[in-house]
């Protein structure tokens, strides 16, 4: 699968995909839909603190950086995917903006500062996104102003306790759901 950055300073730049079939890179069309949905809500990505969780190739986080995000935390546990993320970051000379953590999203400790945007693309039908979001909320990674994107299989319903669905789109085999923390 050929991956590329869709917009911003690195528009058109190719990205390395992880070797093997343990990850499923987000299709360009799905990424385009997601970032269009986010841009209409956020206005822009300038200065945002972003996390790309279950990062795979890192394409989602790198797309946000290309569009002006200040920093991105990449979390991935698959060794070939971690190599692809590091290769992509090096090829874009983006090391100063990136923090790559090799391991499970559930191994993240308490946040030093909350995130503006969290991009999750867990294995379809695993429930891992819901588990990760619950933990991130409890550890201070998410606040009332945070935006969350969760990619699931098109037929998966997204209903998470403590979160409200702002938007939901089916794109091919995927569903992109934008979430916010629910008001108490």
Image (cartoon, rainbow, N blue to C red):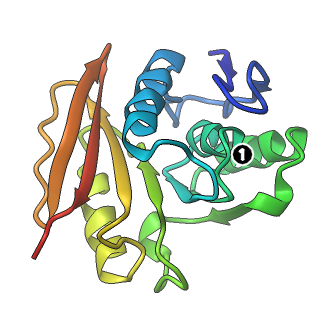
Rendered residue at 84%/62% (across/down): 96
Whole-percent x and y of residue 50?
55, 57
42 lies left or right of 84: left
Please state the total of marks drawn on the protein image. Answer: 1
Q: Toward the viewer: 147 or 14?
A: 147
Query: Residue tagged by mark 1?
Result: 85
Q: Quadrant of residue 36?
A: top left
Give the structural element (helix, strand or loop) at label 1: helix
Q: Toward the viewer: 153 or 110?
A: 110
The vertical placement of 19 against 139, above or below, is: above
List the single residue furthest toward the front. 43
Whole-percent x and y of residue 107?
48, 75
Rendered residue at 30%/55% (across/down): 128
109 lies left or right of 183: right
Whole-percent x and y of residue 165?
17, 47
Whole-percent x and y of residue 102?
64, 63
């Amino acid at each position: 699968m050929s991956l590329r950055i869709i917009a911003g300073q690195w528009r058109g730049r190719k990205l390395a995909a992880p070797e093997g079939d343990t990850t499923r890179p987000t299709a360009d069309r799905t990424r385009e839909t997601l970032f269009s949905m986010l841009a209409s809500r956020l206005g822009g990505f300038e200065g945002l603190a972003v996390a790309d969780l279950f990062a795979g190739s890192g394409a989602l986080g790198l797309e946000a950086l290309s569009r002006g995000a200040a920093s991105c935390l990449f979390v991935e546990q698959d060794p070939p995917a971690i190599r692809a993320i590091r290769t992509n970051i090096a090829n874009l000379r983006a090391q100063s903006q990136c923090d790559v953590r090799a391991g499970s999203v559930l191994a993240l400790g308490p946040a030093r500062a909350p995130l503006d945007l969290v991009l999750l693309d867990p294995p379809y039908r695993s429930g891992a996104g819901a588990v990760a979001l619950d933990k991130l909320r409890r550890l201070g990674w998410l606040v009332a102003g945070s935006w969350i994107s969760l990619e699931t299989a098109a037929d998966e319903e997204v209903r998470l306790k403590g979160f409200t669905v702002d938007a939901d789109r089916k794109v091919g085999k995927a569903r992109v759901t934008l979430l916010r923390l629910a008001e108490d």
